[in-house]
């Protein structure tokens, strides 16, 4: 699933991902969550962490998504050059990588 850039998103926003096992649902949800909390376009009271709900079918999937969100925030906050997937996250934003780094550092 290809996600839109943050400039095309609005709140409230519902994203339903219905796909078979191993198809990347958790990866997609993780990307969208990071996009919501770091986006300059969506920066208002609605995308506060307490206003975002992500639901999965199992506790394992929820745990994995939480771990991935924390991992991505660390990668972006510390500006780790070693992660090859970082450009995939940067492509979701209309702001500069430096600004993403600053916002991720605030968490």
Image (tube, rainbow, N blue to C red):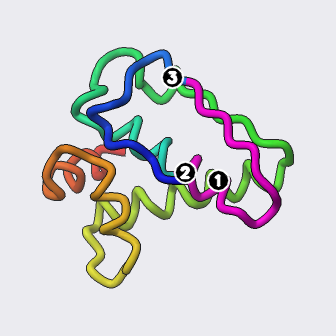
Residues tagged 1 and 2 counted as in contact (Cβ below 8 A): yes
Quadrant assignment, res 6: top left
Q: Quadrant of the C terminus?
A: top left
Name the residue carrying label 3.
Answer: 13
Quadrant assignment, res 72: bottom left
Does 107 sit left or right of 40 as displayed?
right
The disc placed on residue 65 is: 1
Name the residue carrying label 2.
Answer: 30
Whether the magenta-drawn stretch holds residue 62 is answered as no
At mark 3, the secondary structure is loop
Q: Earlier in the sequence, mark 3 or mark 1?
A: 3
Q: How would you rate the neighbour count of disc 2 (Cα within 10 Å): few for under 14, some for 14-19, many for 20 or more?
A: many
Please identify, in this view, whether the residue under mark 2 or under mark 3 is nearer the observer. 3
At mark 1, the secondary structure is helix
Residue sitting farthest toward the right: 58
Q: Residue at x 23, y 51 (%)?
A: 100
**Position in image of residue 23 (x %, y %):** 71, 63
At mark 2, the secondary structure is helix
Q: CA distance from mark 2 to mark 3?
A: 15 Å
**Position in image of residue 20 (x %, y %):** 81, 57
What range of the chain is rendered magenta?
14-30
Whether the magenta-drawn stretch holds residue 16 is answered as yes
- Vertically, is 41 above or below 97? above
Q: How would you rate the neighbour count of disc 3 (Cα within 10 Å): few for under 14, some for 14-19, many for 20 or more?
A: few
């Amino acid at each position: 699933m290809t996600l839109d850039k943050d400039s095309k998103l609005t709140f409230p926003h519902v994203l339903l991902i219905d796909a078979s096992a191993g198809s990347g649902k958790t990866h997609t949800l993780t990307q969208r969550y990071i996009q919501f909390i770091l986006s300059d376009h969506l920066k208002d009271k609605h995308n506060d962490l307490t206003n975002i709900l992500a639901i999965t079918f199992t506790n394992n999937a929820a745990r994995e998504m939480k771990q991935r969100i924390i991992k991505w925030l660390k990668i972006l906050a510390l500006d780790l050059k070693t992660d090859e997937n970082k450009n995939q996250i940067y492509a979701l934003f209309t702001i500069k990588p430096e600004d993403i780094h600053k916002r991720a550092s605030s968490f």
